[in-house]
Image (tube, rainbow, N blue to C red):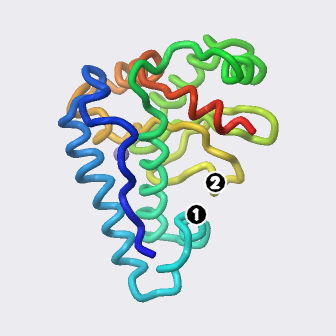
Amino acid sequence: MAITLPELPYSTDALTPYLSPETFEYHYGKHHQTYVDNLNKLIAGTAEETASLDEIIMAAEGGKFNNAAQVWNHNLYWNSLTPNGGGAPTGAAADAIAESFGSYEAFREQFKAAAVGQFGSGWAWLVRDGSQLAIMATGNADLPMKHGKTALITCDVWEHAYYVDYRNRRPDYVDTFLDHLINWSAVENGLS
Ligand code: MN
């Protein structure tokens, strides 16, 4: 079973002006597609052709891990974004954020610090760790499932995620992610 590039859950101009169609052209159409293509080459003719992406990630190291994890991370990233997203959540997501972080403002401050402070390429995550929510940052392709945690949403902080629209201004990109793009429905769906 070949690994495939999932359809985006919205059109490539749906997140304008926060993320441009050009960003989607490169980030989704080139970077994400290349991780998919590379992984399919690496598993072709092996027993992993019939494995799930999660199974490949948990067993792999080196280049196969990097490409498999980057496919998975980008799958989650696109679903972590939504038109008219961001800002403080409501409902069950709001309750979970308040319970784990004390307040939405505390969550926002900690998530921004993790995303901006990740040196070099990587990811910032909101994860479920037992009954609590927590924030993580990982380098390169590393991801929460390797650390026994369940990822709910992620912010890609590789330069390719923001350089077209924000140049070197990672903090502005992270502010935009938090204030305009977070898909709180994805958080709510991952709570149980
Ligand atoms: Mn990326």
**What amino acid is found at the position of numbered circle 2 in the picture?**
Met
Q: Position of residue 134 (x, y in %)?
A: 69, 33
**Residue 145 tag number:** 2
Residue wearing tag 1: 54
Residue at image position (43%, 55%) is: 70
Q: Position of residue 185 (x, y in %)?
A: 57, 29
Residue at image position (60%, 69%) is: 55
Residue 95 falls in which quadrant of the image? top right
Q: Is 51 rendered above or below residue 155?
A: below
Q: Viewer-nearest of labels 1 and 2?
A: 1
Q: Position of residue 131 (x, y in %)?
A: 81, 36
- Quarter of the image where the N terminus is located: bottom left
User: Which class describes the residues within 10 Å of circle 2: few (<14), some (14-19), or many (20+)?
Assistant: some
- Please, what secondary structure does the residue beneath circle 1 have? helix
Left or right, 112 with reference to 35 = right
**What amino acid is found at the position of numbered circle 1 in the picture?**
Asp
Q: Which numbered disc, 1 or 2, marks the residue that appears first in the sequence?
A: 1
Residue at image position (48%, 35%) is: 80
- Quarter of the image where the C terminus is located: top right
Q: Is 150 rendered above or below residue 39?
A: above
